[in-house]
Image (cartoon, rainbow, N blue to C red):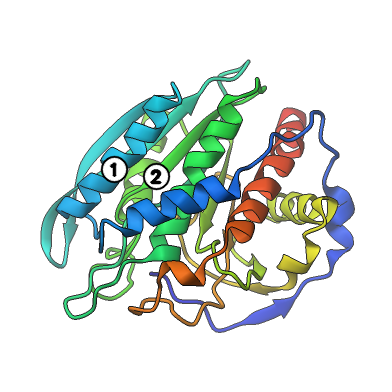
Amino acid sequence: MRGPLAFVRVVALAALALGAGPVRPAPPFDGAAALRHVERVVALGPRPAGSPASARTRAYILGELRAASIATRVEPFEAATPHGRLKMANVVAVLPGRRPDVILIGGHYDTKWFPDIPFVGANDGGSSTALLIELARALAAQPHEFAYWIVWFDGEEARESWSATDSLYGSRWMARELARTGRLPRAVLVADMIGDRDLGIRRESFSTDWLTDILWTAAARRGFGAHFLPGALAVEDDHAPFLRAGVPAALLIDFDYPPWHTAGDTLDKLSSRSLAIVGGVLLEALPAIEERLLRK
Protein backbone atom coordinates (compact mmCIF):
# COMPACT_ATOMS: atom_id res chain seq x y z
CA MET A 1 0.00 0.00 0.00
CA ARG A 2 0.87 3.59 -0.25
CA GLY A 3 3.49 5.10 2.06
CA PRO A 4 2.99 8.47 3.80
CA LEU A 5 5.01 11.32 2.36
CA ALA A 6 7.57 13.01 4.52
CA PHE A 7 5.70 15.96 5.91
CA VAL A 8 3.03 16.68 8.48
CA ARG A 9 1.39 20.04 8.94
CA VAL A 10 -1.07 21.37 11.50
CA VAL A 11 -4.29 22.65 9.95
CA ALA A 12 -6.54 25.07 11.82
CA LEU A 13 -10.11 23.90 12.20
CA ALA A 14 -11.65 27.36 11.83
CA ALA A 15 -12.79 26.10 8.42
CA LEU A 16 -15.36 23.89 10.15
CA ALA A 17 -17.88 26.62 9.62
CA LEU A 18 -17.65 26.04 5.87
CA GLY A 19 -19.62 22.80 6.07
CA ALA A 20 -23.30 23.38 5.53
CA GLY A 21 -25.83 21.72 7.81
CA PRO A 22 -27.63 18.61 6.62
CA VAL A 23 -30.86 19.03 4.72
CA ARG A 24 -32.10 15.60 5.85
CA PRO A 25 -31.31 13.35 8.81
CA ALA A 26 -28.46 10.94 8.13
CA PRO A 27 -29.50 7.28 8.02
CA PRO A 28 -28.06 5.01 10.72
CA PHE A 29 -24.89 3.04 10.12
CA ASP A 30 -24.55 -0.47 11.58
CA GLY A 31 -20.97 -0.89 12.80
CA ALA A 32 -21.65 -4.33 14.24
CA ALA A 33 -22.91 -5.58 10.88
CA ALA A 34 -19.82 -4.09 9.21
CA LEU A 35 -17.55 -5.95 11.61
CA ARG A 36 -19.35 -9.21 10.78
CA HIS A 37 -18.53 -8.60 7.11
CA VAL A 38 -14.88 -8.17 8.06
CA GLU A 39 -14.98 -11.48 9.93
CA ARG A 40 -16.32 -13.27 6.86
CA VAL A 41 -13.84 -11.85 4.38
CA VAL A 42 -10.89 -12.40 6.74
CA ALA A 43 -11.97 -16.04 6.99
CA LEU A 44 -11.20 -16.30 3.26
CA GLY A 45 -7.51 -15.71 4.04
CA PRO A 46 -5.14 -13.54 1.97
CA ARG A 47 -7.03 -11.92 -0.93
CA PRO A 48 -4.52 -10.39 -3.37
CA ALA A 49 -5.82 -9.19 -6.73
CA GLY A 50 -6.21 -11.95 -9.28
CA SER A 51 -6.37 -14.75 -6.69
CA PRO A 52 -9.18 -17.29 -6.11
CA ALA A 53 -9.75 -15.74 -2.67
CA SER A 54 -10.17 -12.33 -4.30
CA ALA A 55 -12.86 -13.82 -6.56
CA ARG A 56 -14.58 -15.29 -3.49
CA THR A 57 -14.48 -11.88 -1.80
CA ARG A 58 -16.05 -10.34 -4.88
CA ALA A 59 -18.76 -13.01 -4.82
CA TYR A 60 -19.44 -12.23 -1.17
CA ILE A 61 -19.83 -8.50 -1.89
CA LEU A 62 -22.16 -9.23 -4.80
CA GLY A 63 -24.23 -11.63 -2.71
CA GLU A 64 -24.73 -9.08 0.06
CA LEU A 65 -25.73 -6.34 -2.38
CA ARG A 66 -28.13 -8.54 -4.30
CA ALA A 67 -29.72 -9.68 -1.05
CA ALA A 68 -30.40 -6.00 -0.36
CA SER A 69 -31.84 -5.55 -3.90
CA ILE A 70 -29.10 -3.10 -4.84
CA ALA A 71 -28.26 -2.88 -8.54
CA THR A 72 -24.66 -3.92 -9.06
CA ARG A 73 -22.22 -4.35 -11.91
CA VAL A 74 -18.79 -5.92 -12.18
CA GLU A 75 -16.22 -4.14 -14.34
CA PRO A 76 -13.43 -6.57 -15.31
CA PHE A 77 -10.10 -5.44 -16.70
CA GLU A 78 -6.57 -6.71 -17.14
CA ALA A 79 -3.57 -5.04 -15.54
CA ALA A 80 0.10 -5.27 -16.43
CA THR A 81 1.90 -5.93 -13.14
CA PRO A 82 5.42 -6.99 -12.08
CA HIS A 83 3.87 -10.49 -11.83
CA GLY A 84 2.54 -10.43 -15.38
CA ARG A 85 -0.89 -9.56 -16.70
CA LEU A 86 -3.56 -10.21 -14.08
CA LYS A 87 -7.32 -10.28 -14.38
CA MET A 88 -8.95 -7.87 -11.94
CA ALA A 89 -12.44 -6.45 -11.46
CA ASN A 90 -14.03 -3.47 -9.74
CA VAL A 91 -17.48 -3.89 -8.20
CA VAL A 92 -19.94 -1.00 -8.50
CA ALA A 93 -23.22 -0.64 -6.60
CA VAL A 94 -25.52 1.86 -8.33
CA LEU A 95 -27.98 3.89 -6.25
CA PRO A 96 -30.07 6.21 -8.47
CA GLY A 97 -30.82 9.76 -7.39
CA ARG A 98 -33.22 12.44 -8.52
CA ARG A 99 -30.55 13.67 -10.94
CA PRO A 100 -27.93 11.74 -12.92
CA ASP A 101 -24.93 13.50 -11.32
CA VAL A 102 -22.81 10.96 -9.42
CA ILE A 103 -20.99 10.99 -6.11
CA LEU A 104 -18.59 8.06 -5.87
CA ILE A 105 -17.68 6.48 -2.53
CA GLY A 106 -14.94 3.87 -2.78
CA GLY A 107 -12.33 1.72 -1.12
CA HIS A 108 -10.33 -1.37 -1.98
CA TYR A 109 -11.10 -5.03 -1.36
CA ASP A 110 -7.77 -6.61 -2.24
CA THR A 111 -4.97 -7.40 0.19
CA LYS A 112 -1.27 -6.98 -0.52
CA TRP A 113 0.50 -10.04 -1.92
CA PHE A 114 3.25 -11.44 0.28
CA PRO A 115 5.21 -14.60 -0.57
CA ASP A 116 6.19 -15.35 3.03
CA ILE A 117 3.48 -14.22 5.48
CA PRO A 118 -0.25 -15.02 5.80
CA PHE A 119 -1.50 -11.47 5.35
CA VAL A 120 -5.28 -11.46 5.94
CA GLY A 121 -5.61 -7.65 5.95
CA ALA A 122 -8.41 -7.23 8.48
CA ASN A 123 -7.97 -3.45 8.45
CA ASP A 124 -6.08 -3.00 5.18
CA GLY A 125 -8.66 -4.25 2.73
CA GLY A 126 -11.17 -5.82 5.12
CA SER A 127 -12.42 -2.66 6.82
CA SER A 128 -13.09 -0.79 3.57
CA THR A 129 -14.79 -3.84 2.06
CA ALA A 130 -17.16 -4.05 4.98
CA LEU A 131 -17.77 -0.33 5.40
CA LEU A 132 -18.91 0.02 1.79
CA ILE A 133 -21.41 -2.84 2.04
CA GLU A 134 -23.15 -1.16 4.97
CA LEU A 135 -22.92 2.29 3.38
CA ALA A 136 -24.67 0.94 0.28
CA ARG A 137 -27.43 -0.53 2.45
CA ALA A 138 -27.89 2.70 4.40
CA LEU A 139 -27.99 4.89 1.29
CA ALA A 140 -30.37 2.54 -0.49
CA ALA A 141 -32.86 3.00 2.35
CA GLN A 142 -33.70 6.63 1.56
CA PRO A 143 -34.03 8.91 -1.48
CA HIS A 144 -31.25 11.34 -2.36
CA GLU A 145 -30.64 14.12 -4.87
CA PHE A 146 -27.47 12.72 -6.43
CA ALA A 147 -26.86 9.22 -7.72
CA TYR A 148 -24.28 7.24 -5.76
CA TRP A 149 -21.78 4.72 -7.00
CA ILE A 150 -20.31 2.63 -4.21
CA VAL A 151 -17.10 1.16 -5.65
CA TRP A 152 -14.93 -1.68 -4.42
CA PHE A 153 -11.61 -1.12 -6.20
CA ASP A 154 -9.43 -4.08 -7.08
CA GLY A 155 -5.65 -3.92 -7.14
CA GLU A 156 -5.08 -0.94 -4.88
CA GLU A 157 -2.01 -2.62 -3.44
CA ALA A 158 1.36 -2.71 -5.17
CA ARG A 159 2.41 -6.20 -6.22
CA GLU A 160 6.02 -5.38 -5.35
CA SER A 161 7.00 -1.77 -4.55
CA TRP A 162 4.65 1.22 -4.71
CA SER A 163 5.08 3.22 -7.92
CA ALA A 164 3.04 5.07 -10.51
CA THR A 165 2.61 1.83 -12.47
CA ASP A 166 2.52 -0.69 -9.61
CA SER A 167 -0.41 0.51 -7.48
CA LEU A 168 -4.01 1.71 -7.72
CA TYR A 169 -4.80 -0.58 -10.64
CA GLY A 170 -8.59 -0.47 -10.24
CA SER A 171 -8.98 3.24 -9.56
CA ARG A 172 -6.52 4.20 -12.31
CA TRP A 173 -8.43 2.03 -14.77
CA MET A 174 -11.81 3.42 -13.72
CA ALA A 175 -10.77 7.08 -13.73
CA ARG A 176 -9.24 6.66 -17.17
CA GLU A 177 -12.37 4.96 -18.57
CA LEU A 178 -14.74 7.52 -17.07
CA ALA A 179 -12.65 10.40 -18.40
CA ARG A 180 -12.56 8.79 -21.83
CA THR A 181 -16.36 8.45 -21.92
CA GLY A 182 -17.12 11.80 -20.27
CA ARG A 183 -18.77 10.23 -17.22
CA LEU A 184 -16.53 11.34 -14.38
CA PRO A 185 -18.32 11.75 -11.02
CA ARG A 186 -18.86 15.14 -9.41
CA ALA A 187 -16.99 14.13 -6.24
CA VAL A 188 -15.13 11.13 -4.85
CA LEU A 189 -14.74 9.95 -1.26
CA VAL A 190 -12.38 7.07 -0.41
CA ALA A 191 -12.06 5.18 2.88
CA ASP A 192 -9.14 2.91 3.73
CA MET A 193 -7.84 1.41 6.99
CA ILE A 194 -10.67 2.84 9.08
CA GLY A 195 -11.41 -0.05 11.45
CA ASP A 196 -8.52 0.44 13.90
CA ARG A 197 -9.65 0.26 17.55
CA ASP A 198 -7.52 3.34 18.28
CA LEU A 199 -9.07 5.45 15.54
CA GLY A 200 -7.28 8.68 14.66
CA ILE A 201 -7.76 10.13 11.16
CA ARG A 202 -5.65 13.06 10.02
CA ARG A 203 -6.56 15.39 7.18
CA GLU A 204 -5.08 14.04 3.95
CA SER A 205 -3.00 16.72 2.23
CA PHE A 206 -3.75 15.87 -1.39
CA SER A 207 -7.50 15.85 -0.76
CA THR A 208 -9.79 18.68 -1.88
CA ASP A 209 -10.00 21.14 1.00
CA TRP A 210 -13.73 21.83 0.89
CA LEU A 211 -14.55 18.11 1.00
CA THR A 212 -12.23 17.58 3.95
CA ASP A 213 -13.75 20.59 5.73
CA ILE A 214 -17.24 19.14 5.35
CA LEU A 215 -16.12 15.73 6.65
CA TRP A 216 -14.47 17.29 9.71
CA THR A 217 -17.57 19.41 10.33
CA ALA A 218 -19.73 16.29 10.18
CA ALA A 219 -17.42 14.52 12.64
CA ALA A 220 -17.65 17.43 15.08
CA ARG A 221 -21.42 17.58 14.72
CA ARG A 222 -21.67 13.86 15.53
CA GLY A 223 -19.40 14.22 18.56
CA PHE A 224 -16.49 12.34 16.97
CA GLY A 225 -14.04 15.21 16.77
CA ALA A 226 -11.55 13.34 18.97
CA HIS A 227 -11.08 10.83 16.13
CA PHE A 228 -10.72 13.40 13.33
CA LEU A 229 -7.45 15.09 14.09
CA PRO A 230 -6.15 18.58 13.21
CA GLY A 231 -2.81 17.44 11.76
CA ALA A 232 -2.31 16.46 8.14
CA LEU A 233 -0.54 13.69 6.26
CA ALA A 234 -0.04 13.19 2.53
CA VAL A 235 -1.11 9.71 1.39
CA GLU A 236 -1.57 8.44 -2.16
CA ASP A 237 -4.58 6.16 -2.41
CA ASP A 238 -7.55 5.42 -4.67
CA HIS A 239 -8.67 9.06 -4.63
CA ALA A 240 -5.48 10.14 -6.44
CA PRO A 241 -6.41 9.10 -10.02
CA PHE A 242 -9.64 11.08 -9.74
CA LEU A 243 -7.84 14.15 -8.40
CA ARG A 244 -5.53 13.95 -11.40
CA ALA A 245 -8.61 13.83 -13.63
CA GLY A 246 -9.87 17.07 -12.08
CA VAL A 247 -12.51 15.59 -9.77
CA PRO A 248 -12.81 16.88 -6.17
CA ALA A 249 -11.80 13.95 -3.96
CA ALA A 250 -10.98 13.20 -0.33
CA LEU A 251 -9.46 10.29 1.58
CA LEU A 252 -10.25 9.07 5.08
CA ILE A 253 -7.41 6.89 6.40
CA ASP A 254 -5.91 6.09 9.79
CA PHE A 255 -2.29 5.49 8.84
CA ASP A 256 -1.07 5.28 12.44
CA TYR A 257 -1.54 1.52 12.51
CA PRO A 258 1.48 -0.53 13.68
CA PRO A 259 0.31 -3.89 12.18
CA TRP A 260 0.19 -2.34 8.68
CA HIS A 261 1.43 -4.88 6.13
CA THR A 262 2.27 -7.48 8.76
CA ALA A 263 0.74 -10.79 9.76
CA GLY A 264 -0.61 -8.92 12.79
CA ASP A 265 -3.30 -7.10 10.79
CA THR A 266 -5.97 -9.36 12.28
CA LEU A 267 -9.56 -9.06 13.41
CA ASP A 268 -8.71 -8.42 17.07
CA LYS A 269 -7.22 -5.04 16.12
CA LEU A 270 -10.58 -3.75 14.84
CA SER A 271 -13.63 -2.23 16.48
CA SER A 272 -17.24 -2.04 15.38
CA ARG A 273 -17.35 1.42 16.96
CA SER A 274 -14.58 2.69 14.68
CA LEU A 275 -16.45 1.39 11.65
CA ALA A 276 -19.65 3.01 12.94
CA ILE A 277 -17.88 6.34 13.49
CA VAL A 278 -16.51 6.52 9.95
CA GLY A 279 -19.74 5.27 8.38
CA GLY A 280 -21.77 7.74 10.42
CA VAL A 281 -19.53 10.67 9.50
CA LEU A 282 -19.74 9.87 5.80
CA LEU A 283 -23.53 9.66 5.94
CA GLU A 284 -23.70 12.89 7.95
CA ALA A 285 -21.48 14.69 5.44
CA LEU A 286 -23.25 13.69 2.23
CA PRO A 287 -26.16 16.17 2.37
CA ALA A 288 -23.72 19.07 2.79
CA ILE A 289 -21.59 17.72 -0.07
CA GLU A 290 -24.67 17.53 -2.27
CA GLU A 291 -25.63 21.08 -1.29
CA ARG A 292 -22.15 22.37 -2.16
CA LEU A 293 -22.19 20.61 -5.54
CA LEU A 294 -25.62 22.05 -6.35
CA ARG A 295 -24.16 25.55 -5.85
CA LYS A 296 -21.24 24.94 -8.22
Q: In this rendering, is residue 265 above or below 99?
A: below
Q: Residue 185: image x %, image y %?
A: 52, 34
Residue 43 x, y percent position in the rendering: 30, 58
Marks counted in the figure total 2
Residue 177 seen in the current view:
no
Q: Are marks 1 and 2 in contact (CB under 8 Å)?
A: yes
* Secondary structure beneath label 1: helix
Residue 259: x and y in percent read 44, 79
Please name the residue that numbered disc 1 is placed on.
58
Residue 232 is left or right of residue 260, and the answer is: right
Q: Hey, which quadrant is residue 188 in on the image? A: top right
What amino acid is at disc 1?
Arg
Q: Image height check: is 288 above or below 232?
A: above
Task: Name the image quarter holding the C terminus.
Answer: top right
**Residue sitting at 15 percent across and 51 percent down?**
52
- Front-lying residue, 161 or 183: 161
Look at mark 2 in the image and give the residue it sits on. Answer: 152
Which amino acid, mark 2? Trp
